[in-house]
Amino acid sequence: MRFGLMAACAMAICVPSGTAQDKKGQEKETPLWAESWEEAVKEATIRNVCILYHIHGDGAQKIQEMVDDVRKGSYVQASKAFVNVIVNQNNGHGEETVTVDGQEVRRCKRYGGIPCDSHVKMWESISKTGAVQGDNAQIMIPQVWILGPGGSLIEAKNSNGGNVIPSSDVLKDAMQIMQKLGGEHMSYDKWLQMSAARGEWKRAWEKGDWKKAMAAALTLKKSSSKILRIEGEQGLNKMSDKGDELLSQAHSLLSSNPEEGKKLYKKIAEEFKPLSASRKAAEALAAIK
């Protein structure tokens, strides 16, 4: 499916893009743009929040005013309640290197937060929203679409003949829509916590750090998100199987190397709480003494 752009505002001389970093090369405030459509939908589904889908073009004063509006601190903070997407098929904004968490990364000068390639590729996701039907459809820009957690269009806010779409109106409408969706909505801070737990689970499991893996799985199991609770349950099941496997190894070691067998029992007892393997290991140690 192909899409064309129709500017809703009179075209003007292209306004120079604002820089995305300060004098020290640190990234300035910018909405937390999703780097891909798949990432946006996955996060929104887990958090049960709306997606704010911004569609922009280049070369118009009104669009630049909208860019400036969403990069204000007040919008940046409030928009964390949702997942943010920026769509712009033009890649002539230029990129710069900024420092994020001690790492140098490439960022679009106009939007910040993502490389230009991300907002260009996001153009391909328009058809997935169900908002535009038919080949060679024309899309009026700028627009902001409020999408449900699964990525389907709920409300489209257009520029009304060239007027800037106030970010405060977008946030207000999105919050009202999200409240009607029902269920618990995960805050961005909680999402960061859960994301960290998911990463910790994977790293700890691969390294055999059972104590950290157990803590991460238990954190996910307590999540408000059904998806994450299932992940946590799956993690605990894997830990249970691993605990039983190690119990068998410890039992075999007792006859060939008693001290190593005791060490393994102790490790299981300490690192597999509150699973049954921990209790069984503790009982085995008590019986040996």
Image (spheres, rainbow, N blue to C red):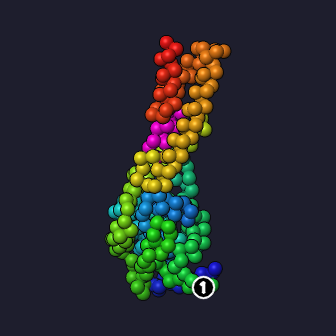
Q: Position of residue 28 (x, y in %)?
A: 43, 57
- Front residue of 191 and 55: 191
| Callout 1 amino acid | Gly
The answer to whether 273 is drawn above or below residue 2 in the figure is: above
Specify whether residue 215 is painted magenta: yes
Q: Position of residue 110 (x, y in %)?
A: 50, 66
Instruction: Name the residue: 44% across, 58% down.
Output: 47
Local SS, label 1: loop
- Front residue of 130 and 86: 130
Specify whether residue 34 is painted magenta: no
Instruction: Name the residue: 63% across, 80% down.
Output: 2
User: Magenta residues: mostly which secondary structure?
Assistant: helix
Which residue occupies the extreme top position in the image?
A: 289
- For label 1, the residue is 134
Count residues near mark 1 (Cα–Cα under 10 Å), then give few for <14, some for 14-19, many for 20+.
few
Q: Quadrant of residue 89?
A: bottom right
